[in-house]
Image: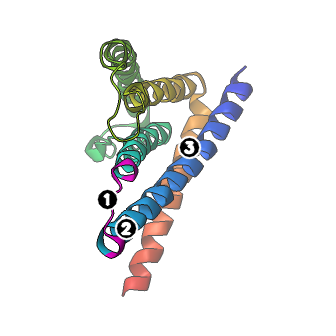
Amino acid sequence: MTNVLVRIGDVLRRLLSFLVGAMLLAIVLLVCVQVFSRYFIGAATPGMAEISRLLFIWLTFLGAALLISRRELIVIDFLHDRLNADLFKRLGVVIDLATAAFLVMLIVYARHLMIVVGQKIAPATGLPFAWFYGSLIAFAGLGLFFVIERILTPRQSALREAAFRAQSQGHGASTESSAS
């Protein structure tokens, strides 16, 4: 069961990484087309602006879910050096449970928001606003999955988080050394 959970989590992390990168590229391309269209052709493209906003909203929330999977969304690590390993693990579980409670509440209220506002239509594209608010439910659902995965597979999660930290520190070190 836990191996399946870890495999699904790994696939979701790869998929989210790809989607976030693809959305960022799409936003850059759409904005470039908008600028070219407005300043060189003289035609406004409100539909592209709306699609860019939609992609930015989804990019933000899917990126936040990816950061939850790596335990990097909101990290206050000044306690890390002050606590022993056992106490720090317990604090991690408490933080995960609080995060899970928040994400469950977010799913409930985002669902209510989608029912109330989701019937409205975006003016330029004609898309229902449910497409915009659906990103909240996707974020909360994915984040909840990653928190549950972390709670049920603590050893694999700790190894994965250490690898992410080492990778991000190695990337930061290579960037700093190339800048000097």
The residue most toward the front is 42
Q: What residue is at 43 percent from the left and 27 percent from the top?
A: 134
Q: CA distance from mark 2 to mark 3?
A: 31 Å
Q: What number is the disc on residue 37?
A: 2
The residue most toward the bottom is 180
The quarter in which the N terminus is drawn is top right
Q: What residue is at 49 percent from the left and 60 percent from the top?
A: 25
> Which circle's residue, 3 or 1, is located before the other in the chain?
3
Q: What number is the disc on residue 44?
A: 1
Residue 162 on image: x %, y %: 53, 48
Q: Say whether marks 2 and 3 touch (CB < 8 Å).
A: no
Q: Amino acid at mark 2?
A: Ser
Q: Residues within 10 Å of mark 2 (few under 14, many from 20)?
A: some
What segment carries the magenta color?
A: 40-48
Q: Amino acid at mark 1?
A: Ala
Q: Which residue is label 3 attached to? A: 16
Q: What residue is at 41 percent from the left and 20 percent from the top?
A: 100
Q: Say whether marks 1 and 2 touch (CB < 8 Å).
A: yes
155 left or right, relative to 35: right
Q: CA distance from mark 3 to mark 1?
A: 32 Å
The quarter in which the C terminus is drawn is bottom left
Colour scheme used in the picture? rainbow
